[in-house]
Amino acid sequence: MNWELPQKPAEISESRLIDAILSGQFPIDSNLPAERELAVTLGVTRPTLRETLQRLARDGWIEIRHGKPTRVRDYWREGNLGVLAAIARYPGSLPVDFPVNLLSLRSLLAPAYTQLAVERASGAVVELLQSFQNLDDDPLVFTEFDWRLQLELTLLSGNPVFTLIYNSFTDLYRVLGVVYFQHADYRSLSQRFYRNLLKYAAANDAVGAGKLVRETMTSSQMLWQGLKVSPV
C-alpha cells in the first residue's frame, strides 16, 4: 500500500498563498501583508513563512524586496514552469482561453517529439499504440490513455525537456481531457488518430507521423474552441 505523506507546513502555506493569488485575494502587482501578519493569517511560524516565500519567489509568483513589501508578480509574464505546474492544480482559476493556449503549445511540441520517437524507437511506439484498440468507450479511459501515450512519446523522443514540459501540466491535462472526451465524436477522432499513427510507426515513417500529429492537434484545437466551455 502506498501511504500519502502529510504535507509539511511550508507546503500548506505555499498552497494557500497560491490559491489566494489565483483567486484575486492578492492580485497581480499588489503587496502581501507584513510578514508577522501573514504568518498569523496562514497559521505558521515566521521561519516557515520565509521558506514559503522563498519557494514562491523561485517560481516567479512573488518578488521579495528587501526593505519593501513583497510584491505579487505578473506570473503570466514573469513565472516559469513551476507556475505552470501549480496552476494545473487550480483549474477553476484559469482564464477561459487557457485550454486553447495550452493546445497551441501542444500543437507545436507534439509533432516534434512524436517524429523523434518514431525515428528512435518505432517498435516501442507500435507496441504502445496497439493497446488503443481495446479501450473502453469512456471519457476517463480515453483521457488516461492519451495522457500516457503523450508521456511515453516524450520519453521515447530522447529529449528530456519535452518530458519536463509535459509533466508540468499533467494535472490540468487530465482535467481538460475528461471534458474533451465527453463527446463521442472527439473520441472517434482520437481513435482514427491512434490507428493512423500506428500505421506510420509500423512503416517507420517519422515525417508522416509528425505531419499527422500536427494536423490532428490543429483539429483538436478548433474543436475545443467550438466547445465554448470553461476548463471545469
Image: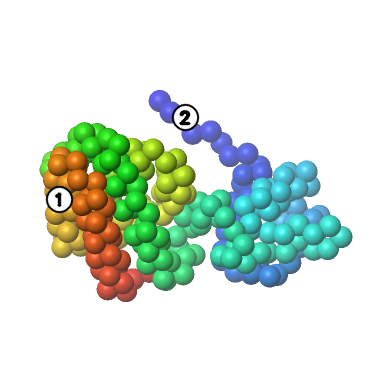
State the residue at coordinates (30%, 37%).
120
| Residue that carries the numbered disc 1 in the rendered image | 196
Image depth: mark 2 or mark 1 in front = 1
Task: Please determine whether, in this image, residue 116 is positioned above or below residue 102.
Answer: above
- Type of the residue with mark 2: Trp
| Residue that carries the numbered disc 2 in the rendered image | 3
Which residue, as the protein is rendered here, is positioned at the far top? Answer: 1
Q: Secondary structure at mark 2?
A: loop
- Type of the residue with mark 1: Asn
| Classed neighbour count for the residue bearing mark 1: other residues with Cα under 10 Å, few (<14), some (14–19), many (≥20) | some
Q: Secondary structure at mark 1?
A: helix
Q: Is there any visible trace of residue 153 in the rendered image? A: no
Give the side of residue 32 with respect to residue 228, left or right.
Answer: right
Task: Please determine whether, in this image, residue 9 is positioned above or below residue 216.
Answer: above
State the residue at coordinates (46%, 69%).
95
State the residue at coordinates (15%, 63%).
185
Q: CA distance from mark 2 to mark 1?
A: 41 Å
Considering the image in quadrants, where does the C terminus appear? Answer: bottom left
List x then y, in percent, for residue 28: 64, 69
Q: Is there any visible trace of residue 63 in the rendered image? A: yes
State the residue at coordinates (31%, 53%).
111
List x then y, in percent, for residue 23: 56, 66
Nearer to me, 103 or 143: 103
Task: Please determine whether, in this image, residue 98 is positioned above or below residue 48.
Answer: below
Task: Please determine whether, in this image, residue 182 is positioned above or below residue 124.
Answer: below
Give the side of residue 83 with respect to residue 116, left or right.
Answer: right
